[in-house]
Image (cartoon, rainbow, N blue to C red):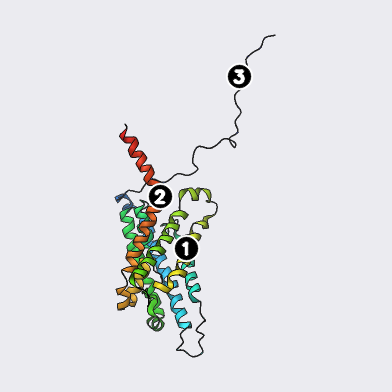
Amino acid sequence: MTKEAVTKEPVTDPELEPTSKKDYSDPPPVAFIDPKELTKWSFYRAIIAEFIATLLFLYITVLTVIGYKSSTDTTKADVDPCGGVGILGIAWAFGGMIFVLVYCTAGISGGHINPAVTFGLFLARKVSLFRAILYMVAQCLGAICGVGLVKAFHKTYYNTYGGGANELAEGYNKGTGLGAEIIGTFVLVYTVFSATDPKRNARDSHIPVLAPLPIGFAVFMVHLATIPITGTGINPARSFGAAVIYNKEKAWDDQWIFWVGPFIGAAIAAFYHEFVLKAGAVKALGSFRSSTHV
């Protein structure tokens, strides 16, 4: 009886094999300047979406602020000073509107609705220079129009109750206000980066509300913390639109805080997410070292 060598091929189960390939891919960096996108309708559609979204955002939120101040005006007869929606309600209005509008516009423009968010994404090479600039212009114009609608429909209340303008509260210095805006915007933009990370999208793609929800909740939480300090900007378009329509000296004197603070906070968030959490600096250094040995 002869023994034959029998070669058995290993039986593999695809479900049991470790997968070496990622189920997601990081998109390549966007070109710094991309003239081709200026010829596409989708580019201008996105700009229009940012304009309309910011208009709606300012209309609802500023109207909420003015309504709260009106309902708690102690100079009126039979007014409960503890009535109205309160700071909690104002924070919900801002956070809730961001949740709704990001959900509606994310597939069209990315749902920025905030120049600081656009700036952070630009630094991370997620949007081009042209797109970033035109987004910011559309957001600022939308904010002006949104607050303008509030004034047009409720002129007396608007002028009486401060127009929803961001101003540094009494008792706080400008450094405190600037710090509040930097940290608040960092929380928001860091949340945006985390919620839109390709790895998270691949894992949670079956639940489409998971990106807008934490972004809106971040806005809500930051408002709870910073409304007593600055009225909460963390959005230069929101602060600029209210200042343009209200047009009072105090609002313009403090305006720089609501641009410098959010832009610094957005830049820190972009650096932290891209170069620390995603190890962008380590990867770049490794690529540099390998190229020097070639």
The secondary structure type at the circle numbered 3 is loop
Could you tell me residue 173's position as x and y percent? 34, 73
Name of the residue lying farthest toward the top? 1
Mark nearer the viewer, 3 or 2:
2
- Give amino acid for label 1: Ala
Of residues 102 and 20, the one nearer the viewer is 20
Q: Residue 37, percent across and down?
A: 33, 52
Q: Position of residue 122 (x, y in %)?
A: 35, 54
Q: Which mark is residue 139?
A: none
**Residue linked to disc 2:** 276
Task: Verify CB contact (< 8 Å) between mark 3 and mark 2.
Answer: no
What whole-number distance in Å separates the C-alpha atoms at marks 3 and 2?
A: 50 Å
Q: Which residue is mark 3?
A: 7
Determine if residue 132 is in view: yes
Secondary structure of the residue carrying numbered label 1 = helix
Mark 3 vs mark 1: give the one in front: 1
Image coordinates of residue 273 in percent, x first then y, are: 41, 52
Q: Spatial distance from mark 1 to mark 2, Cα to Cα?
A: 21 Å
Compared to residue 195, the image places residue 78 above or below, namely: below
Nearer to us: label 1 or label 2:
2
- In primary-sequence order, the first of circles 3 and 1 is 3
Which residue is found at the position 41% from the left and 70% from the top?
A: 232
Quadrant for the C terminus, please. Answer: top left
Q: Is the residue 285 above or below the residue 213 in the image?
A: above
Task: Give me the C-alpha separation between circle 3 and circle 1.
Answer: 61 Å
Q: Earlier in the sequence, mark 1 or mark 2?
A: 1
Vertically, is 21 above or below 76? above
Amino acid type for the residue under numbered disc 3: Thr
- Counting other residues with Cα less than 10 Å from the Cα at mark 2, is it few (<14), some (14-19), or many (20 or more)? few
Q: Which residue is mark 1?
A: 218
Q: Is residue 125 left or right of residue 205?
A: left
Q: Quadrant of residue 253?
A: bottom left
